[in-house]
Image (cartoon, helix red, strand yellow):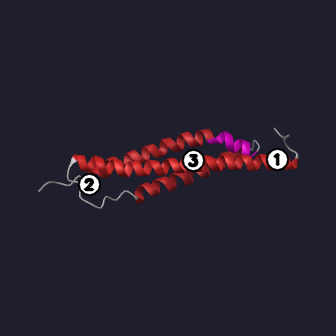
Amino acid sequence: MQASLNFATYVIYLPVVIVVTWLVAWILFKNSSVFMLDIFHGKQDLAMATNALFETGFYLLNIGFAFLIMKVSWKVPDAQTLVEVLSSKLGGFFIYLGIMLFFNLYLFFRGRKVSKARSQQAGLHPAQ
């Protein structure tokens, strides 16, 4: 009887999704502090706290989704099937992660736009 490679699939899948999620979050939230400072008009404590909350939510949503879709419902008998299963699981997760990245960027740009509009209405910043 040949052993199943399901466990090996999980051993490869989990570190990959965790590392890629961490890398995307690190890049996104390192650079988003500029948007947060602009949105909160230079109030660094409020901007960094909000950025940290967004980052925490990003990790929870993405790692949670990675665990949700992790299950392999069939036996993985050989290396070829293992690669095919991993490509399907990882590809789907990376598409989802990309969508989440762009959703976060949308939120940052939207927040910046709303903040600038409110500032202009209040007369804090001249129109550019």
Report the quarter where the N terminus lies. Answer: bottom left
Q: Which mark is residue 6?
A: 2
Q: Residue at x 46, y 49 (%)?
A: 95
115 over 74 or under it: above or below: above
The chief SS type of the magenta part is helix
Q: Disc 2 and disc 1: Cα gap in Å?
A: 56 Å
> Mark 3 or 2 closer to N-term?
2
Amino acid carrying label 3: it is Phe
Q: Residue at x 47, y 46 (%)?
A: 21
Which residue in the rendered view is the most extreme toward the bottom? 73
Residue neighbourhood size for the residue with mark 2, other residues' Cα within 10 Å, grouped as few (<14), some (14–19), many (≥20): some
Q: Are marks 3 and 1 in contact (CB under 8 Å)?
A: no
In the rendered structure, the answer to whether residue 23 lies left or right of residue 45 reads left
Which residue in the rendered view is the most extreme toward the left? 1
The residue labelled by disc 3 is 102
Q: Disc 3 and disc 1: Cα gap in Å?
A: 25 Å
Q: Which mark is residue 119?
A: 1
Secondary structure of the residue carrying tag 1 is helix
Q: Disc 3 and disc 2: Cα gap in Å?
A: 32 Å
Q: Are marks 3 and 2 in contact (CB under 8 Å)?
A: no
Secondary structure of the residue carrying tag 2 is helix
Q: Are marks 2 and 1 in contact (CB under 8 Å)?
A: no
Amino acid carrying label 1: it is Ser
Residue 63, horizontal then vertical, whole percent: 46, 53
Segment colored magenta: 32-40
Residue neighbourhood size for the residue with mark 1, other residues' Cα within 10 Å, grouped as few (<14), some (14–19), many (≥20): some
